[in-house]
Image (spheres, rainbow, N blue to C red):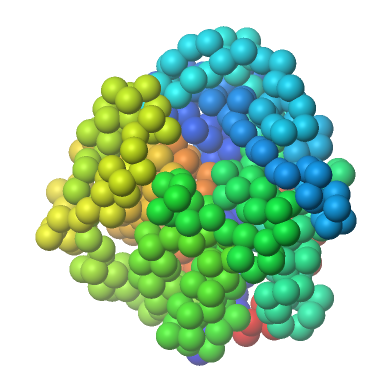
Amino acid sequence: MKNSIKIKNALWGLFIADSISMPVHWYYKREYIKNEFGTIDAYHKASHPHPESFMVGNTYFPNVQMAKQLNRPFDILHKHIQFYNTSYNDLDINLKVHEGEHKNPMPLLDERYHYHHGLEAGENTLGANLVRVLIRSVIKNGEYNQDLFLDDFITYMTTIGQNRDAYLEIYIRDWFENYSKGIAPELCANTQHNRWSIGSHGGIIRPLILSLTAKSSYDGVGIAIDHQNLTHRSQNISSALAQLVPLLFDLINDNSPMDSLNSTVEDIALVKLHGFELSKKYANAMGPANIPKDEMWKIHTEFTDERLSELLPNATDENMITTRFATACYPEHGIPLILYFLYKNSFNFKQSILDNANAGGDNVHRGMILGALAGASSEEIPKDLKMGLKAYEDIKNEIDEFVKITS
């Protein structure tokens, strides 16, 4: 039987891990974290400048004329439009240099705005706030309804003042580009075949939480993948959910965390291209956008016969983080890292989320997944971490109401 306390703690874990990782999101070089913060061990605001930010200049090209004819809202950027190159504004920031882990084009340092520019210590990113949109939709309707969630998603993203986070993942921008063309909302998701980064951690987070509405992990996997396909059509995400949903259910059903993890890692295959080699390949191409789609597909979907269970007994931060697995947004790298942090710390909640934050890269989205798993294994979440969230009271109320429906 599902333990309602552990469901609550899984949700708290998600929001806490998101916010605590936020200030160093996409810091690929860990020395940048050490130089600016020493180590992340508390909530911090997003600082300026970001040493490796290539958010500035990201594209968003909705069909404005068609959207207006269809009476469909298209502006999802609002005040953050200053950072983006779109079909309805001119970017006033030059992308002059190729720096950072992947050598993507980026501005000079003084215009290298943080991905979460303007967020204060304890605030949550858009990814976590879209989990709240989902939770509120379930609460409002007493159950999950796909069409009503999509309505809430569209309203949230297109209403001025709702989203304070400057960083909109590519899946959101692609989704609304399709929506502006008149495509049915349930079909607006881009595919991993067409856009490699659709296969990212961001596609796991909401489906993993929605699976908690199911009575069993068997049903939960189906619910999760069905919801996933609304925004991310990705083989890699589906594979990850097929492993993570049963693990989450084991944890909320009070099974031994380490026994459950050891069972899970037996089925986790290892991606062929190692983390260091992946970064080198991206850098040599002067950014992953310059690598042909067919080659990118192979990079992210070719696996070895090894299993993660073979690596963990001798795993260390040095031979796992960036060396064996990239800290980028891809589940084939991030899921093994999540399981490594949980294994290394025997599911200790605080140490696991701090290790993830200080690993850098896509620590925010990777962290939400890890935080949910670490929280689900915990009897209690530190009160100071919960109350340190800026939206503590609202989040608490939403968690309490959601758990009444899922328990």
Give the total of numbered labels.
0
317 in relation to 213, above or below:
above
Foreground residue among 179 and 76: 179
Q: Quadrant of residue 347?
A: bottom left
Q: Quadrant of residue 316?
A: top left
| Residue displayed at 46% across by 47% down | 195
Q: Quadrant of residue 218?
A: bottom left
Foreground residue among 207 and 85: 85
Q: Position of residue 35 (x, y in %)?
A: 46, 17
| Residue displayed at 49% across by 33% down | 26
Foreground residue among 240 and 345: 240
Q: Position of residue 1 (x, y in %)?
A: 50, 89
Does any portion of residue 384 appear in the rendered image?
no
Q: Position of residue 225 (x, y in %)?
A: 49, 72
With 135 as the anchor, is 22 left or right in this view? left
With 255 as the anchor, is 350 left or right in this view? right
| Residue displayed at 32% across by 25% down | 285
58 in relation to 163, above or below:
above
Q: Position of residue 66 (x, y in %)?
A: 78, 50
| Residue displayed at 25% across by 63% down | 268
Does any portion of residue 397 appear in the rendered image?
yes
With 29 as the anchor, is 407 left or right in this view? right
66 in relation to 185, above or below:
above
With 86 as the anchor, is 250 left or right in this view? left
Q: Quadrant of the C terminus?
A: bottom right
